[in-house]
Image (cartoon, helix red, strand yellow):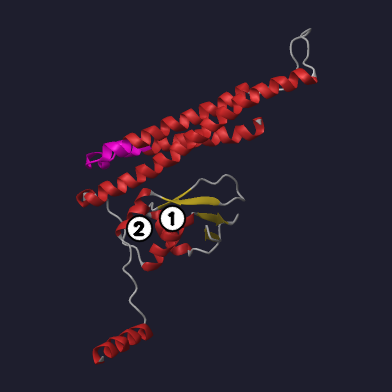
Amino acid sequence: MLKQLVPAIAQVHELTGRTLRQLTVLDGSQYTVVPGSRTSLKTLSTVVEAACLAALDLAEAVADNPLEAAGFAGEPSLDDAARQARDTKIRAGLADILADAVHQLDVCATGCHYTVSGIIRDLTRHPQHMPPLPQLTRSQYTALEKVAQGGARFWRSLRGDRETVRAGDGSAIPIKPFHLLAKNQLVHVQERDSALGGQDVTVTAAGLLVLDTQRPSRTPPSAPARRAASAASTAGRRR
């Protein structure tokens, strides 16, 4: 159990730090003058609180989980029956602790969703506060949309001469549009954990704003479809 909890606790603390950095950036930005921004900042601050509570739950599970080690000299050791009784009693408490940690992390996810949705809503309602955003081409928009739909993963070869990006569905994302998205901070590339592993790619709030405000218009019908529609219209008039 300790081996399972250690990486989880480290990840929660890392995510808490990232959330605090984003909250600090928002708090010091021009977004604070946009009507409604207080709600989004408050929501993000509750994400920090919930993340800390989740880390606390996991830490409590580490503390409560019995570790098999030698006691003091002369202290009687537990026999199998006593150890089993102790473990049964503790297991129920640990289940409750871990369930609360899951709940707190669900609150974090919901809070992040509401924060991003709130930012987009506020800026859409008050376009005079809209930050400068790049106008994407169709291929760039498609690449951003793929990342938003299922995430993506970025790989760079050890020599740095080859880069690959794959969407969550396994399809390749052209590297040139991807670099433009990253340069304009429309996507976030997670820091590399190792030289061999890929890096997770997610859409930023600015990227979601671009997706919402630059949604391409519906593609006009093809020539055969137009001819069929014209023929049907003509036939209707003859009737």
Task: Verify CB contact (< 8 Å) between mark 1 and mark 2.
Answer: yes
Location of mark 1 (residue): 148
Q: 168 or 96, which lies in front? A: 96
Q: Residues within 10 Å of mark 1 (few under 14, many from 20)?
A: many
Residue 69, visible in the rendered structure: no
Q: Position of residue 141 (x, y in %)?
A: 38, 63
Say whether residue 88 is left or right of residue 161: right
Distance CA(mark 1)–CA(mark 2): 9 Å
Q: 168 or 231, which lies in front? A: 231
Q: Is residue 179 above or below residue 126?
A: below
Quadrant of the image occupied by residue 91: top right
Location of mark 2 (residue): 211
Residue type at mark 1: give it.
Answer: Ala
In this rendering, the count of numbered labels is 2
Q: Which residues are magenta?
A: 23-41
Residue type at mark 2: give it.
Answer: Leu
Say whether residue 46 is left or right of residue 70: left
> Which residue is the extreme one toward the top?
74
Residue at 54% of width from left, 37% of height from top?
11
Q: Position of residue 36 (x, y in %)?
A: 24, 40
Q: Give the mark nearer the N terminus: 1 vs 2.
A: 1
